[in-house]
Amino acid sequence: MASKRVAAEPAGFSDVGSADILPGLFPHQEHCLEFALRTGRAAGFLDTGLGKTAMGLAWGDAIVRRTNRPVLMLAPLAVAAQHQAEATRIGVEAKLSRFGIAPERPCIAITNYERLERFDPADYAAVILDESSILKSFTGSTKRKLVEAFAGTPYRLCLTATPAPNDHTELGQHSEFLGVMRPPEMLSRWFIADQANAGRYRLKKPAVRSFWDWVASWARCVSKPSDLGFSDDGFVMPKLDVRRHIVQADRSVDAGEEKSGQGRLFRIPSASATSIHREKRLTKDERAARVAELVRAEPGEAWICWVETDYDADALKALLPEATEVRGSMSIDQKEERLSGFSSGAVRILITKPSIAGFGLNWQHCARMAFMGLSFSYEAFYQAVRRCWRFRQTRDVHAHVVCADTEVSIWDVVNRKAGDHSAMKAEMSAAMARAAQSHRVLETYDPQQGARLPAWMVQ
């Protein structure tokens, strides 16, 4: 059986020792750092607030010192400055780079994904993809260019939170970027087609343990430090209070007609994308009014108002003119300026989409958010919530979900996926615990006492 076990071949440094481990890291960060250096091309699926950024910067710093070449770190919009501040805090040299010029002195160069085309991957010994789940958000051609651009880069590190439930394609995309295994081979080994969901795959029951053991050979998936055998002290989450607000839709509006041509008295929504968007348009004013009411009820709090569409944002902005909006049509610089304003506290109320600001940003200063409706993406909801509800948040977080009674099906799907996510994290935790048992760090030999020869050898 052992001979049939599939595992990634290490492509890093076999002699990783204490000299490579940056002082001041938590034990679970040290473990992940040592693993990533030894593996060479690795992924760190660490939940929000567990210190992915510090671990990634420490990894990049170790690569710089070992190769004497710069390392490129790619981050989501408005996150680069946040990472540079973290680098300064932990004593790692890192510089913001906007124009693609490699640093004169080897160090970590941090930039946004949007500026990647300005950089030559050949100038760098390693690349770090921060919030690497963004891989699946790219179009096929852009994602392919990213994979191909760094195919020859010796050392690669992907950092993101735990993968989305039942979206094993994301793991395949990471595996492909790291040069471990292409998605078709992964699917053929451990998955079968899900007959209930066209185009989807599900993990074979007998293959669950084998699959996660394979993932553990090139990744570390950590929901809390105890997953790797360390103490959870200092990493206890505050309470998350999700409050659901139902807005009654007027079903007599746009009721439509039967096939016979007879008019209906009431509208009958379906779960199709077209129907859902129609319902959102018809209820946008009512949902916006409820969100605005919640925000005005707590004027001393910072608020994030998450929207799914531009027409939702327009309706809410009309009721909250003092709010600052960030939307996709804005320039990169304008988005960065406004998101940074919220991070610094200069902006109290932010209106934006999870697709724009749902990744990477640390907003522990905010403990209030409102969703003006939801999409079927559990990951978008999870990531948006975790901008504020994360380790080192000192207050309970209130997440208000405002939706129409005609959108109940979306809430049910998100709740089901939340349960799937918990089950998947349990499998990952078990695999990580098994992998952690073989963990070791070589201590640098540092003799403190001189050797004494026996008398017969001295004569």
Image (spheres, helix red, strand yellow):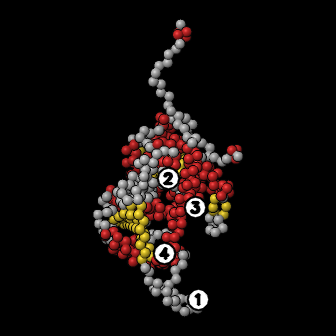
Q: Secondary structure at mark 1?
A: loop
Q: Relative to 190, is 14 on the left or the right? A: left
Q: Earlier in the sequence, mark 2 or mark 4?
A: 2
Camera-side mark, 1 or 4: 4
- CB under 8 Å between discs 2 and 4: no
- CB under 8 Å between discs 3 and 4: no
Q: Residue furthest left?
A: 300
The quarter holding residue 258 reads: bottom right
Task: Give amino acid for label 3.
Answer: Asn
Residue bearing mark 4: 407
Camera-side mark, 2 or 3: 2
Where's residue 316, x and y in %? 37, 72
Task: Give amino acid for label 1.
Answer: Lys
Q: Earlier in the sequence, mark 1 or mark 3?
A: 3
Q: Secondary structure at mark 3?
A: loop
Task: Give amino acid for label 4.
Answer: Glu
Badge 1 density bin: few <14, some 14–19, many ≥20, Cα 10 Å: few
Residue located 32% across and 56% down the image: 344
> Is residue 337 visible to us here?
no
Residue bearing mark 3: 166
